[in-house]
Image: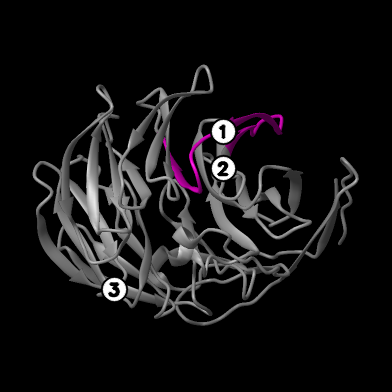
Amino acid sequence: MKKRLKRNGVMVQAAASLSLILMGCALSTLTASPAPHTPDDPGEAAWADIPEGFMRVVVSPDDARLYLLRDSEPQSGLLILDAATARPLHRIPVGRKPIAMAMDGEIGYVVNYLSDDVTVVNLKTPEAVKTIPVGHRPIRAATSARTPYLFVTNYGSDTLSVIDKNTLKVLKTLSLGGRPADMAIHPEGRYAYVLHRGTGDLSVVEIASFEVIRKASVGEFPTDVAVSEDGQLLFVSDAHVGTLNVVRTDDLKVIRKIRIGERPMEVLTVAGGPIYVLNNQSQSISVVDPAKQEAVVTIPLKYSPRCMTTTSDGGRLYVSYGERYGEITVVEMAGQKVVRSTSSPVVSMER
């Protein structure tokens, strides 16, 4: 099956093959070709292994579409797929090396690591509507429906850019230090929790005042942070020791360290459900019971995963492997067993 869509004369090809592996989950893969990248800033040494290919996968709020960030030239951009069939629908050009994406309804904010800006995308149209310059080497973005702001961590300049979502302009730039990277927003939109990969600290930014009101060490090399549904706990993955650190939000004290896989990279929480942790080196997903505060299930993966996203109910995970394999794996979580597989037809998309 082939489908050709033409826009701006750019050709994008995505090949996909169905792969079913009996490891307690359903797997389907979408394959892409890699391209090399050499870091041009000594300060980004910790990110020298950032993969090309599909850097990040995000699912739409209604679970109907997948958004893939592809950073290898000449096929870089935001690729929109039908989540049920993995059929590519659109490709939207963005900046250089798109590395992260935040969403607020039908608006997407794509962080471009090498062009030092954020591309604002109308996901309904779909089209890029504005480019916002930020700090040096932006790495992550976060927002929520409870705040009028978008927060962007600038890994290279040690700053946090605060963008007004109404005017699409940088309202304030906070100097944080310590290589700020991953973030989480308080459920009520009161605080932004920012991890520092350079120091192992976490900063609490009060959104009303745009001031850092608290800062403490939360791990040896924290890689991601998620906040509990009630806003009382933070869950921080520590890549050096292979733990998920449970941190109280009121005093930033680490109250428990949950042993998970090796080199955990990302953490996802699901309302009323478990915590998912993506383990890069041990090639697995740890499923953590938030009440027991322990890992209850480990789901093996094909390769070393780089990123994941979940459907709104947490019933399905999409996992990206990046440069080496350029695949997206679909993991059905019901009962941690095979419940169905999603076919991924070979397509060619011309824009």
Mark drawn on residue 133: 1
Residue 23: percent from the left, percent from the top? 47, 81
Residue 143: percent from the left, percent from the top? 41, 34
Residue 84: percent from the left, percent from the top? 64, 54
Q: What amino acid type is highlighted by mark number 2?
A: Asp
Q: Using a 10 Å C-alpha cutoff, classify the residue at mark 2 as few (fewer than 14 neighbours), some (14 to 19) or many (20 or more).
A: many
Residue 152: percent from the left, percent from the top? 44, 39
Residues shaded magenta: 118-143
Q: Residue 168 appears in which quarter of the rendering?
A: top right
Q: Residue 39 appears in which quarter of the rendering?
A: bottom right
Is 48 placed left or right of 124 in the picture?
A: left
Residue depicted at x 69% and y 56%: 85
Is 233 placed left or right of 159 in the picture?
A: left
Q: Are marks 2 and 1 in contact (CB under 8 Å)?
A: yes
> From the viewer's perspective, is residue 336 above or below residue 291?
below
Q: Using a 10 Å C-alpha cutoff, classify the residue at mark 1 as few (fewer than 14 neighbours), some (14 to 19) or many (20 or more).
A: some
Residue 203 magenta-drawn? no
Q: Is 342 in front, or is 212?
A: 212
Mark drawn on residue 234: none
Q: Is residue 350 visible?
A: yes
Q: Which residue is mark 3?
A: 240
Mark drawn on residue 116: 2
Is 164 placed left or right of 208 in the picture?
A: right
